Image (cartoon, grey):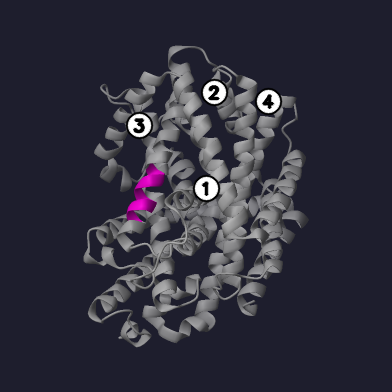
Amino acid sequence: MQPTVFLGSAAVVIGFVTLGVGWPQAAQQAFAALQSAILTNLGWFYVLGATALLVFVLGLLVSPYRHIRLGGQDSEPELSYLSWFAMMFSAGMGTGLVFWGVAEPVMHWSDPPFAATAEGGPVREALRLSFFHWGFHPWAIYIVFGLSIAYFHFRHELPLAPRSLLYPLIGKRIFGPIGHAVDILATVGTLFGVATSLGLGAIQINAGLGRLWGVPQAESIQVVIIAVITVIATISVVSGVQHGIRLLSRFNIGLAGVLLLFVLVAGPTVYLIQLFISAFGAYLQQFVSQSLWLDLRPDSQWQFDWTLFYWSWWISWSPFVGVFVARISRGRTIGEFILAVLFVPVLITFLWLTVFGGTALHGSVLGDSGIEAVVQQNASAGLYAMLDQLPLQTFTSILATLMVVVFFVTSSDSGSLVDDMVTSGGHPHPPKAQRIFWAVAEGTVAATLLLSGGLQALRTASLTSGLPMTLFLLIACWGLLKALRADEQVAGIPSRKALRD
């Protein structure tokens, strides 16, 4: 244990849970006020920061630094490509993509922020906006954190913890109060980011149980779901990366692949292929303008509700995904890391949004499927409403619910492992007792957020923890660039003195 980081992080979490349980109305009011202040005054910072991180990553990809290996020049990857991709995708998107895969395109179609162009139409525009929120920006954010951690840990034997990102800037002071503060921030941010996904996952599992067996939609049911899944996740995280987490991730990717293929074949296949090509083209055409767009309409909440929520969510997740992806990426080159993390998950994500969201939109545009009304009333039920339009509704609903459960577990166990590594001073194999503590803490925070404000509390937790993390990531870019320049100037693995100089 790193006492300062562990106890400091635990104190923040316990204080938050105490506030949410003891004074739920005051917590709701505080969440609402804080969310309004951040969105109104600092929304531009999220937009500019996320785009700057993407530009930095693309610059690294075409630079000579792409040949540097994460580890010694003879280092070999410990995981196959399949396991690497499966674990990366399950950690990076997982529950959130399943939750919003149908609901978001339908919402953008029914309530579009822009007038659709004549050649594109509202369906392509709805999918383009969904691509934007789930595309290159979030994975670039993850890359900045993950690549920096992996570089400093595997090439310079620094701790597998966020504090290491500041080593080129402050040297050994990362082992003092500044480093402790950064690790506490990352631990709490990870906890809130994962808890947000756990809350969304519990809501969707509840919706699936309601569709299948008439289980009512209620916060009490969702808290029970969180408790049950937390127990499963705890068992998984105790077993470690090579066993529980790896096997569950591969199993879940298999489930997702089966469901994706079924909907593609049983749904409007040709229409989906055409829609994918068209929406992807529109995404690329408007990429730069959308990346720097700020909604200046005084009566509009669209960017607040969507883009800023997503950017803050990805940023608050970045310590979790970054440390986890770094942990499983030894032996990869910087170029290989960026190509794999930036392009492979994005392609899978776009296919998912097209197949599930496009099938739902096809039913809404060409027929009275009723999906729009379902999504407006309960976004978590959108997936099941779409599956009801296809054959084998009961079987696919069971499969979808099982998939959400396993995504839920992989998000929780990966997040618990990351929090344990950070609060253990960056040790890659942290103690199991602390893994149990963080797994239970994540479930407790998720339940507290649901009870003290529902989706608004989940959004505010991400917004709040993402704000300081954005500044930290921008500083980390500077530190990584300085370290890479030092690596270029000396032979072999550079010394820490070379980094400081």
| Residue nearest the viewer, comparing 45 with 217 | 217
Would you name the residue on which mark 3 appears? 114
Which of the two residues, 292 or 338, is positioned nearer the viewer here? 338
Does dot 4 land on a helix, a strand or a loop?
Answer: helix
Q: Is residue 221 visible?
A: yes
Mark 3 vs 2, N-terminal side: 3
Mark 1: few, some, or many residues within 10 Å (few <14, many ≥20)? Answer: many
Q: Is residue 397 above or below residue 403?
A: above
Q: Is residue 178 above or below residue 130?
A: below
Residue sitting at x 28%, y 33% = 282
- Residue that mark 2 sits on: 386
Residue 235, x across and y down, in percent? 70, 55
- Quadrant assignment, res 413: bottom right
- Residue under label 1: 90
Q: With 39 as the anchor, is 7 left or right in this view?
A: right
How many angstroms separate mark 3 from mark 2 (CA)? 25 Å
Q: CA distance from mark 3 to mark 1?
A: 32 Å
The reply, left or right, for residue 312 in relation to residue 383 is left
